[in-house]
Amino acid sequence: MKFAVVTFPGSNCDQDCYHVVNEVLEEPTDMLWHDNTADLSEYDCVILPGGFSYGDYLRTGAIARFSPMMESVIEYAKNGGLVIGICNGFQILLEAGLLPGAMKINNSLKFVCKHIDLEVVNAETPFTNQCSEGELLNVPVAHGEGNYHIDEAGLQELINNDQIVVKYNNENPNGSMANIAGICNKEKNIFGLMPHPERCSESILGNGSDDGYKIFASILEYVTKRGENNGR
């Protein structure tokens, strides 16, 4: 299995993602600069990491989505490639039109940084197959614009298609509609979430949770089984 992590100017979680997939999962990983295009077909999963990409002063992800590398990511995703966008990566996926909806400023108008409980709504995606439906994952959030919004028709479509993957449990840190913390596309190969699983993927960090590891382990499990089914 091979991962790619895209770095945008201002990304500050790209190295965290690289560490988890390259050192913890022990899978080969390349870092890709945003200002280039690339043939992504050699990768099994592309990660758009969190951080503060350039242009966020206009609207989060609004400029980053025009990076040349996003042309490659869009082509890769539309061909069925696995893409996970974390925090700013989620915002970029929304701006690129790879996921439906939009992100607004937190209802509190304040930046939030804390551990929260996520409820797994759909455990049958490539990103959550190592979880159980209804399982709670303790994962940190850190954002000022995580207030997910979509119109009522769009929300119903997300529900009907099982596209709500994780939602906030008990405490909604940003005011997002229907407590949504992460969604996928209809085909389930593109996943965006505001919480940071890469920040809690090792117990050695001592932050009380390594629940984020299950997200990355799910990707590994999915790709491994897909390879076995394809005779690889």
Image (cartoon, rainbow, N blue to C red):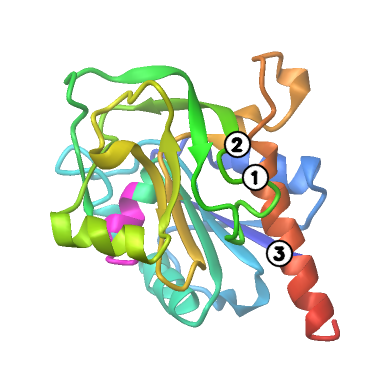
Relative placement, left or right, of 55 versus 20 is: left
The one of 32 and 27 positioned closer to us in this rendering: 27
Cα separation between marks 2 and 1: 5 Å
The structure residue drawn at horizontal position 23% and vertical position 45%, both measured from the top left corner, is 55
Query: Mark 3 — residue?
Result: 222
Query: Mark 2 — residue?
Result: 135
The structure residue drawn at horizontal position 16% and vertical position 62%, both measured from the top left corner, is 153
Cα separation between marks 3 and 1: 15 Å
Cα separation between marks 2 and 3: 19 Å
Instruction: Tell me whether the residue at label 2 lies in contact with that at label 1, contact meaning CB atoms closer than 8 angstroms.
Output: yes
Residue type at mark 1 is Ser
* Mark 3 surroundings within 10 Å by alpha-carbon count, few (fewer than 14), some (14 through 19), many (20 or more): some
Residue 163: give x, y in percent of width and height. 41, 59
Under tag 3, what secondary structure? helix
The one of 196 and 135 positioned closer to us in this rendering: 135
The structure residue drawn at horizontal position 85% and vertical position 81%, both measured from the top left corner, is 232
The disc, 2 or 3, on the residue closer to the chain's N-terminal end is 2
* Mark 1 surroundings within 10 Å by alpha-carbon count, few (fewer than 14), some (14 through 19), many (20 or more): some
Residue 165 is one of the magenta-drawn residues = no
Residue 132, numbered label: 1
Under tag 1, what secondary structure? loop
Residue 63: give x, y in percent of width and height. 23, 54
**Image quadrant of residue 131?**
top right
**Image quadrant of residue 151?**
bottom left
Residue type at mark 2 is Glu
* Mark 2 surroundings within 10 Å by alpha-carbon count, few (fewer than 14), some (14 through 19), many (20 or more): some
Residue type at mark 3 is Tyr
Figure quadrant of the N terminus: bottom right
Relative placement, left or right, of 56 versus 40 is: left
Write down the region rendered in magenta. 91-100
User: Which residue is at the far bottom?
Assistant: 231
Relative placement, left or right, of 170 versus 144 is: right
